[in-house]
Image: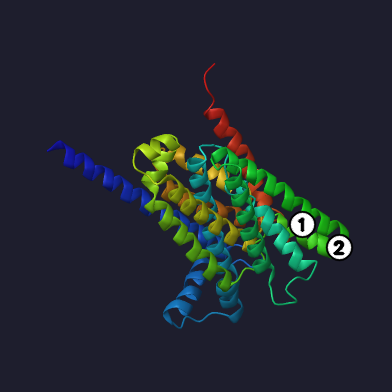
Amino acid sequence: MVQPVVAGERWGARLALITLSFAVLGFMISLAVSIGEISIPLGTTTKAVSNRLFGTAFELSRIHQGIVWDYRLSRALLAASAGAALALSGAILQALLRNPLAEPYVLGISAGASTGAVAVMILGFGYGVLTLSTGAFIGAVVAFILVSALAAGAGGGADRIILAGVAGSQLFNALTSFIVTTSANAEQARGVMFWLLGSLSGVRWPDVYLAAPVALLGFAVSMFYARALDAFTFGVDAAAALGIAINRVRVILLGATALMTAAMVSIVGSIGFVGLVIPHAARFLVGPSHGRLLPASAIIGAIFMVAADIVSRIIIPQQILPIGVVTALFGAPAFALILYKARRPV
């Protein structure tokens, strides 16, 4: 008679934690929509969203309605989607590669996206047909295919994937630098640099319609293979002994990671430390089981990115910092603290 009570208490605690997490995320999104050069009360924000979603007729100025719906809400939702997707990618890679330093950009995807974006922006590839985000996405996919082929040709395995990712990153970073150095004017070089540091400026609803489904799809795939990821943390041999199809699962999960990272990088640029730090923070809070780790990583990543976006808009008056700068400023010390806490006793 004791066990059902304990199980019920556990599910009750989990439900309370999930509810609290979504409440915090909702509050952060509301805060992100309210804060800016023009301060908008939370009540006005709620009325503007209600007018668009439910057809209510609250009296609001067209300026406030446009700022809330067309600019800030889409930006906040994209930040949440990107944070969740990058954190999920980091958690998946750290399990698959059995490397606590693995993160989404280890596959060379960010570097490839940068090259694709630069090719469109500076070289004019696509003749006006391809947007910056589309060029970045194509570059990210090409980079992933190249790195995957290189890793497979080298014999496969986690260490080969990491080495192939490093080689691919160096190659595409060199290509990006070559294009910028030889073909860009000062204004183009500044635009490329701002994009490479990560930016949510110019984000609109079509970007959300791409990012949110990709993040949800990545979450669904990763949760489906949560037990397989638990097995991978003990090594490939242990996973194979449990009947897991190693190659198939690895290809599916790496593909999901590549898709999430490529989609987010193509929209917001390179944003570091989210995929590296957030899974460690989630692991510290909920433990190593991926059934809990993956949802925790997604929600914490979403909250972190929305908070970083808020900071990027208010830390310097009348100036917006690249969001990648903010995530690095907070992520690097956080990761150092995680390393310190996890140090082995001498």
Above or below, comparing residue 60 to residue 317 in the picture: below
Residue for badge 1: 193
In the image, farthest residue toward the top:
346
Residue for badge 2: 183
| Badge 1 amino acid | Met
Is 168 in front, or is 344?
168
At 57% across and 41% down in the image, what residue appears? 155
At 75% across and 70% down in the image, what residue appears? 125
Is 67 in front, or is 250?
250
Residue 291 has which mark?
Answer: none
Q: Is residue 167 visible?
A: yes
140 to the left or right of 299: right
In the image, farthest residue toward the left:
1
Where is residue 58 shown, x and y percent of the image?
A: 47, 80
**Mark 2 to mark 1 CA distance (whole Å):** 14 Å
Above or below, comparing residue 252 to residue 38 in the picture: above
Tell me where residue 79 sits by quadrant. Answer: bottom right
Tell me where residue 135 sits by quadrant. Answer: bottom right
In primary-sequence order, the first of circles 2 and 1 is: 2
Q: Is residue 291 visible?
A: no
Where is residue 193 shown, x and y percent of the image?
A: 77, 57
Q: Report the quarter where the C terminus lies.
A: top right
Badge 2 local density, few (<14 within 10 Å), some, or many (20+)?
few
At 39% across and 39% down in the image, what residue appears? 239
At 45% across and 61% down in the image, what residue appears? 217
| Badge 2 amino acid | Ser
Question: In the structure shown, which secondary structural element does the residue marked by tag 2 occupy?
Answer: helix
Where is residue 38 shown, x and y percent of the image?
A: 64, 68
Contact between labelled residues 1 and 2, with CB atoms less than 8 Å apart: no
